[in-house]
Every structure is written in C-alpha cells, then in structure tokens.
C-alpha cells in the first residue's frame, strides 16, 4: 500500500539554517506527517508511536480565534485523534522560552474557550519539558520496529517476560534469542503494545535497558 502524502493546510517555507524540516511516515496508517522543527519531529514520532493515538494530522485547517483586536486565524501544529473514544486534541509546539513571543498561551486559552466546536475537544501546548530527544528517539525506534514486526518473536518474548515480576534487564529478557536484531525488534513492539514497560521512559532505552512485564496488559 503506498504512503499517503502529507496534507497540511499550509506548507512550511524551505529549510533554513538552524531549522529542521521534513516528513516522517506513520507505518500504522501509511500516512506522511510533516514537521518544521526538531520539537515537532520528535512529537510526530511520539504521537505516531503511541497505541492510544489513532490518527495524527499535521497543520490542520486554520480556525478563527476571537481576540480583543478582532478575529484572527490560527493554525495549530498537530491534531491527534485518540483511539477508542475519538477524543481530538490539538497541539501547539513551542520551546518554553518562545511562548511569549507570539502570545501562544493566550491563543490556546481562547481556542479552548470558544473555538473548538467541530475542530477538536481540547487544545494544549507542549514544550521541551514533554518533548525530548530521548523520547523522540524511543518513539522512532518503535515505529521502525513496527514496520518489521514478527508475531512469533513478539509472542515468544512476551511469554518469557511474563515469568518475571518487577524490573528486569533487557539483556536477561532477550537472552532466549540467537538473533539480537530480532530480539530488540520484539522488545520495541512489546513496548508499543505496553506489554513491556520501560523503567525510565524519559531516557533512551539503550541508556536504561530495564523494563517490567505488564501482567495487566489486555
């Protein structure tokens, strides 16, 4: 199945020095997602890699935001539709030191107070506090693994991991595999499914290679 081209409501200008622009592909939906900064890239990976997010849209259509000096159009960076209940969240992405530059806090407050109808259920801001390179790296690794997911390997690892209670090293869990690449691919797939829970999700998995088996996983 071919990958669907990104369909933002507006296209970013050409890449400039100090800025990161490009697209990623969500292997779960076969859709391309565009980004205009490293923060947006990492968040795109994080949203696409979450089993709780069914759909990710970059730069959805602009909405009218009432302001004291008249109505203004505003385009958010992403809209995420949650799996199960269809709850839609729109996200403005900014480093914290730029939040006052274009009055984004006030804009998001106005969107939540009167501009959500038919567009989303909630508007939020995410900064470098939530969007980190380590979380983005983990999410990218999950998406890469999902492209080559092997059901038998995933089931074998899950069965082995279910024998452990508490935190266990990934070296111990993957020792049953002769092929380390296959073992790690299964690890990432089980993390996506929340069958394996990393002990430090805020760090790259290679820097904190420990996890817990989720005995309550559906």
Image (cartoon, rainbow, N blue to C red):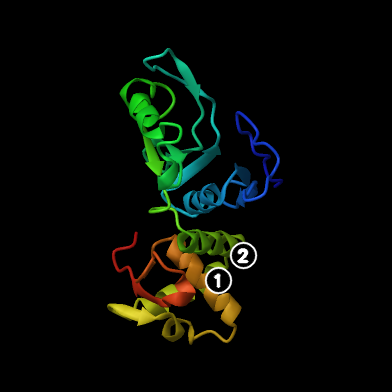
- Of the pair 201 and 105, the residue shown nearer to us: 105
**Above/below status of 152 relative to 109:** below
**Above/below status of 39 relative to 158:** above
Q: x%, y% of residue 7?
A: 63, 34
In the drawing, does residue 144 fall left or right of residue 3? left
Determine whether label 1 and label 2 are within 8 Å by CB.
yes
Q: x%, y% of residue 134?
A: 47, 64
**Above/below status of 195 relative to 178:** above
Give the labeled residue for mark 2: 148
Residue sitting at 54 percent across and 31 percent down?
60
Image disc number at residue 130: none
- Of the pair 124 and 143, the residue shown nearer to us: 124
Label 1: state its secondary structure. Answer: helix
Residue 120 appears in the rendering: yes
Residue sitting at 60 percent across and 43 percent down?
36
Give the labeled residue for mark 1: 185
Residue sitting at 71 percent across and 46 percent down?
2
Q: Quadrant of residue 195?
A: bottom left
- Quarter placement of the C terminus: bottom left
Q: How crowded is mark 1: few (under 14 residues within 10 Å), some or many (20 or more)?
A: many
Residue 121 appears in the rendering: no
């Amino acid at each position: 199945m071919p990958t669907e081209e990104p369909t933002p409501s507006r296209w970013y200008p050409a890449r400039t020095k100090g800025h990161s622009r490009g697209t990623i592909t969500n292997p779960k939906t076969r859709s391309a997602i565009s980004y205009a900064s490293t923060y947006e890239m990492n968040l795109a990976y994080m949203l696409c890699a979450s089993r709780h997010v069914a759909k990710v849209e970059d730069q959805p259509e602009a909405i009218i935001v009432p302001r004291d000096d008249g109505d203004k159009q505003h385009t958010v960076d992403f809209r995420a539709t949650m799996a199960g209940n269809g709850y839609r969240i729109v996200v403005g992405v900014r480093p914290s030191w730029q939040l006052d530059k274009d009055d984004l806090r006030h804009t998001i407050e106005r969107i939540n107070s009167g501009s959500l109808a038919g567009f989303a259920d909630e508007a939020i801001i995410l900064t470098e506090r939530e969007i980190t390179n380590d979380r983005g790296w983990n999410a990218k690794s999950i998406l890469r693994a999902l492209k080559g997911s092997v059901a038998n390997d995933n089931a074998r690892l899950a069965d082995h991991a279910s024998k452990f209670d508490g935190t266990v090293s990934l070296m111990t869990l993957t020792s049953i595999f002769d092929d380390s690449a296959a073992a790690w691919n299964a690890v990432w797939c089980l993390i996506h499914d929340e069958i394996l829970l990393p002990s430090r999700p805020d760090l790259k998995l290679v820097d904190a290679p420990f996890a817990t088996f989720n005995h309550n996983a559906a």
